[in-house]
Image (cartoon, rainbow, N blue to C red):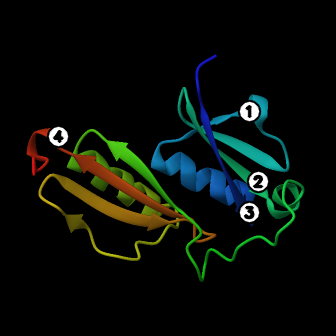
Amino acid sequence: MTKQIFINLAVSDLQKSMDFYTALGFSNNPQFSDHTAKCMVWSESIYVMLLSHEKFSSFINKPIADTKSAVAGLFSLSFDSVEEVNTTMENGLKAGGIEPTEMRDYGFMQQRTIEDFDGHTWEIFFMDMSKVPTE
């Protein structure tokens, strides 16, 4: 079996969150989606599970973090060009996301940050491996 990663996020509005992640380029897998959860596919091995607070709570013994006021994790998505980063960012902003910081240019990598409705933070970036410092 291929190794896969599933990122589980507690969200307050499943449909609104699904629309946001669709705008970023994810697709929905209805086979693993219902009224409590939406499976969003980034690639054949990377998935984001959007879970209602009730569903998310059924897996944990701690309270759900308030990701609007504190960062619980940084998730990153790579793209094939700066143009693709910018287009995806604009789509995410139109879908209701917010950009808490300006684009960062490290010379070899351009990175933008977007937050969803619940404050989950995503770094979207393009990295030019030919420009990565060797020292």
Q: Which mark is residue 129?
A: 4
Distance Cα–Cα, label 2 vs label 1:
14 Å
In the rendered structure, which amino acid carries the disc numbered 2? Leu
Give how far apart the Cα atoms at labels 2 and 4 are.
35 Å
Mark sitting on residue 104: none
Residue furthest front in the image = 135
What's under tag 3, amino acid-wise? Asp
Q: Is residue 45 left or right of residue 16?
A: left
User: Residue 130 appears at what percent x and percent y?
Assistant: 10, 39
| Mark whose residue sits in front, 4 or 1 | 4
For label 2, the residue is 51
Q: Is residue 124 left or right of residue 11?
A: left
Instruction: Compute the Cα span from label 1 to label 3.
Output: 17 Å
Which of these two is toward me, 129 or 89? 129
Estimate how packed mark 4 is, as few (under 14), some (14 to 19) or many (20 or more) residues with alpha carbons within 10 Å: few
Between disc 4 and disc 1, whose residue precedes?
A: 1
Tell me where residue 88 appears, x and y as whole percent: 37, 51
Looking at the picture, which amino acid does disc 1 mark? Pro
Image-quadrant location for residue 91: bottom left
Q: Secondary structure at mark 1?
A: helix
In the rendered image of this protein, does residue 126 appear above or below residue 123?
A: above
Which numbered disc flags the more N-terminal residue, 2 or 3? 3
Q: Which mark is residue 30?
A: 1
Q: Nearer the viewer, mark 3 or mark 4?
A: 4
- Kind of element beneath mark 2: strand
